[in-house]
Image (cartoon, rainbow, N blue to C red):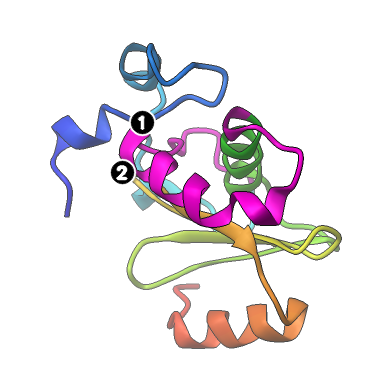
Amino acid sequence: METSETSNNNIAPEATVENSTKAAQSEVGVLGNSSVYGSNPDLPGFTSDNLEEHWESHKKEYHGWTKKQYAQRAHDLVRSATNENILGYKAKNGSIARFDKSTGDFVQGFDTGIATMFKLKGGEVRFNKKKQRAEVDL
């Protein structure tokens, strides 16, 4: 598990990489009180290192997007309440996951920040398999 020093390096999506540390200090949340299906406004964004790594891995899936847009979308989605289009779960490992059926975006976040966001191939069927493997905490 990352230290609190690392978690204070989260990127608030509206912040640039250069000023992310200061902005992120107010973005760190606690998943222990997070909602399985409701909104989670206190969940943090990507750490700067993790954003860089995942942007490089997934930017081809988000053609025409900037790294900032990718970070903002991930942050918005992980904080979203579930509905008929946004599916979600909280796993036993403490992560919150959201899947947008209309765009195929899947995001997973922890109290230390967003782990990843990518286009989930296989859609809702694959999401349900991921949910099953995650040993969902209801």
Residue carrying label 1: 10
Mark-to-mark CA distance, 1 and 2: 8 Å
Q: Image check: 122 left or right of 103?
A: left
Q: Residue at x 50, y 73 (%)?
A: 138
Magenta segment includes 12 = no
Residue range (magenta): 39-68
Residue 21, quarter of picture: top left
Q: Position of residue 47 (x, y in %)?
A: 35, 36
Residue 84, placed above or below residue 42: below
Q: Image check: 86 left or right of 127?
A: right
Residue type pointed to by label 2: Thr
Q: Position of residue 108 (x, y in %)?
A: 50, 58
Residue 58, quarter of picture: bottom right
Most foreground residue, 110 or 40? 110
Q: Residue at x 81, y 58 (%)?
A: 103
Q: Residue at x 46, y 39 (%)?
A: 43
Q: Residue at x 39, y 48 (%)?
A: 53
Mark 1 and mark 2 residues within 8 Å of each other at the beta carbon: yes
Residue carrying label 2: 112
Q: Secondary structure at mark 2?
A: loop
Residue type pointed to by label 1: Asn
Q: Image check: 105 left or right of 79?
A: right
